[in-house]
Amino acid sequence: KTALYNSMLIPKAVGHEEEKTLDVTSDYNDNIISKLPSTLFTKEPDENNYSLHSFERKENSDEVQMNIDFKMDGKNEEIRKLELYPVGIALGTYIIAENEEGIFMIDQHAAQERVNYEKVLKGIVTKTSQVMGVPIAIELSKSDFETINNNKNILTDIGFELEEFGINTFKVSAHPTWVKTGKEEATIRAVFDTLIESNGDFDPVRFNDRVAATVACKASIKGNMRITLNEAEFLLHELSLCDNPYNCPHGRPTIIKFTKYEIEKMFKRVM
């Protein structure tokens, strides 16, 4: 676990070279990245002024792979003490943040996917349900219907309430509280598909993980979807609260660091 953790922190953008003594002109000795008056992780944003639901603009049909995750035991302190502040969005996909150490690029999809993944995974454990005002009918093929019917207790155990409703159809009248408003049918179908794909080889830990990863991906902002700096700030705040803020559920990094030294070397200000 320690070895995995050490490989999962914030990677640098270029090689891990030993920093040399700076040799720059006197007018550059001033701190080019000054301490900002307000920093991201030293204040609590007003959640009423932000809405992650505004990120949910379209479904993602990409296949979600299996992920084995583990609790980081408070190892998110590194990202909290960075005191990052978002200053822009690059290519409609990467949040640009900075502090006195350098510049950080955050993949907005990977970051929100991690946030949503941990929320769903924790929600699955609580097993709390919410009754829907209007039940949703889910029609399936005969074989898929039989698979769900034979494993209905698995869905009931994580907070779904369903019953047979006509030919090869289920009526879902309640869902877990972690299902986002407006995403009910898409989430139910994703959970059904995950159970069907298990092909009878059911393992509760793997199933919960795949459900969390699938739902998190579908509920997260995608690349090339522009967000405001306020939304970026709130997203980074939520990322800093994750058990493992450094990787998305599929193992990709959420954040990459460009140190001040590395940037100055690229511009040939130092050797």
Image: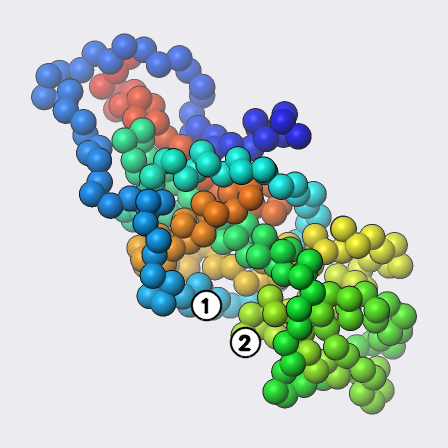
Q: How many marks?
A: 2
> Residue tagged by mark 1?
53
Q: From where the camera sits, is residue 193 visible? A: no
Q: Residue 167 sits in which quadrant? A: bottom right
What colouring method underlies this structural image? Answer: rainbow
Q: Which residue is mark 2?
A: 182
Up-down: is 234 above or below 99? below
Viewer-nearest residue: 55 or 115: 115
Using residue 98 as the reference point, say whether residue 212 is left or right of it: right
Q: Are marks 2 and 1 in contact (CB under 8 Å)?
A: yes
> For the residue carrying disc 1, how many other residues have a C-alpha within 10 Å: few (<14), some (14-19), or many (20+)?
few
N-term mark: 2 or 1: 1
Locate residue 127: give its quadrant.
bottom right
Residue at image coords 42%, 53%: 235
Q: State the image coordinates of residue 72 (x, y, percent, origin top left).
A: 59, 38
Q: Depth check: 141 or 194 in front?
A: 194
Q: In the picture provided, is 247 more to the left or to the right than 154? A: left
- Separation of residues labelled 2 and 1 (CA atoms): 9 Å
Question: The C terminus lies in which quarter of the figure?
Answer: top left
Q: Give SS at disc 2.
A: loop
**Amino acid type, mark 1:** His
What kind of element bears circle 1? Answer: helix
Identified at 22% across, 40% down, the residue is: 36
Q: State whether residue 97 is above or below residue 213.
A: above
